[in-house]
Image (spheres, rainbow, N blue to C red):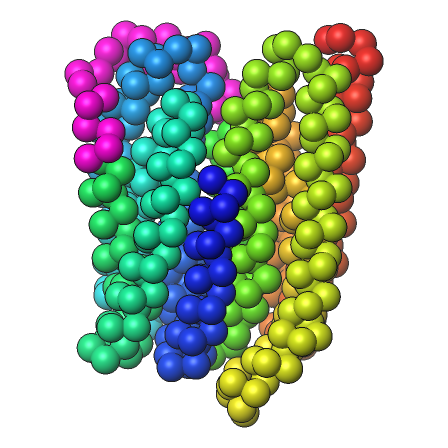
Amino acid sequence: MIRGTLIAQIIAIIGAVFLAKIYGEVAYGFFGVFISITSITSTICSFQLDKLIVISKNLKESINWYNFLLIIIPVSSILISFLLFLISNYFFNEHISLQLIFLCSIGTLLITLNTTNENIFTFKKEFSTISSAKIAVTICNLGFQFFMYYHYALLGLIIGFLISQFILFLFYFLKNKNVVSKTNFSEIKKGIQSNPSILKFLLPSNTINSIANSLMPILILTFFGAKEAGVYFFSLKILGIPLFLISSSVGQVYFQKSSVLYNKNKEELLLLTKKIVSTNLLIMLGFLLLINTFGMYILDYLFVDKWANLKEYTLILSVLVLARTSFNPISSLIVVLNKNLESLLFNSYLFIINLIAIYVGYLNNSIIITIFILAILGGIGYIVLLAYFLNHLKYIANNNV
């Protein structure tokens, strides 16, 4: 799975630079807002019940949750789409609003269904399926986005992305068609009752987390314009590729291993967690040094005079991305340790930081101030969260709780 994800992300980073050159900042701004909206809505769409697919006690229970979500996701995505249409005019002009929200509605449905399918593969430890799919969908995505530029210069990035997600859904669904069956609703009811923190804490926590991590491109588009939103999103995309590589390659495997080790060997879980954190930070630090030195010279050469402030945005946001790397790949500990309340408090903190950053930056008419506040305060928050979880793991390992 790690090899597949690595190949996919190498292709993605080369493709992202090429697409940025031909599409420009404004198109990337709208694509960034699309990704931000769908990141938030896809988190809400499954009510976070897809996590129960992975932590189920047996295959029968896991399959039952899968089939239940195949019913609930289309219904919830329609409701979410309706709410998006109601609030969209507060953020976007009327011309772009209807098109963008319609595409976001389709994206919400496809992304949530694909995540649900990946969770059933994770439970069955079919990581090679996910790995192969990541490579294929990355290539398809770049191909369709390039082709769509000649037909939809402003929204081609979004349309190309949706086409590749639809192909991914067909592939996943055909692979999982043998587990599609009638849902046992009485077992679903029992499962929800035995895991009340999923809906009570995890759903609002992850929703706030998605808003906190994805809200900034929307706010930048609203207060500073699509061009600035595009530069911000592209900076995060370049920096976020290794973070995504680490999180996706390690995260799914760590989720499965941590849920097992928590019940069998808590001391080994602590050692595994420390090893993953230290390795991830070293890898990310090396990448950040490269991108902020040689990488910036290459991008300056390719983009010439376009993408103003890209170098400054990337340098400041590197602090936030490095801090995220310390915790994101092991974030499944929130579910394993049932620390959903703590997660809710932390994500509320991140949300407040976003609002403070955009408010101060807007008052001073400086997006640099906004990004600086977001990076420093956000980075401190992630480091504190990591320290809390490592201390808790140490406590339960020493006391065999």
Lateral position of residue 386 relative to residue 110, left or right:
right
| Residue 156 screen position, x and y as percent | 28, 71
Q: Is residue 226 above or below residue 336?
A: below
Pick out the residue farthest to the front.
3
Range shown magenta: 174-200
| Residue 32 screen position, x and y as percent | 43, 64
| Residue 42 screen position, x and y as percent | 37, 43
The answer to which of 376 and 3 lies nearer the viewer is 3
- Residue 205 shows in this picture: no
Lateral position of residue 173 relative to residue 278, left or right:
left
Q: Which residue lies at the image location 73% right of the left edge and 8% below the top edge?
A: 401
Q: Which residue lies at the image location 40% right of the left edge and 36% below the top edge?
A: 128
198 in the magenta segment: yes
Quarter of the view holding residue 297 = bottom right
- Residue 281 shows in this picture: yes
Quarter of the view holding residue 376 = bottom right
Quarter of the view holding residue 61 = top left
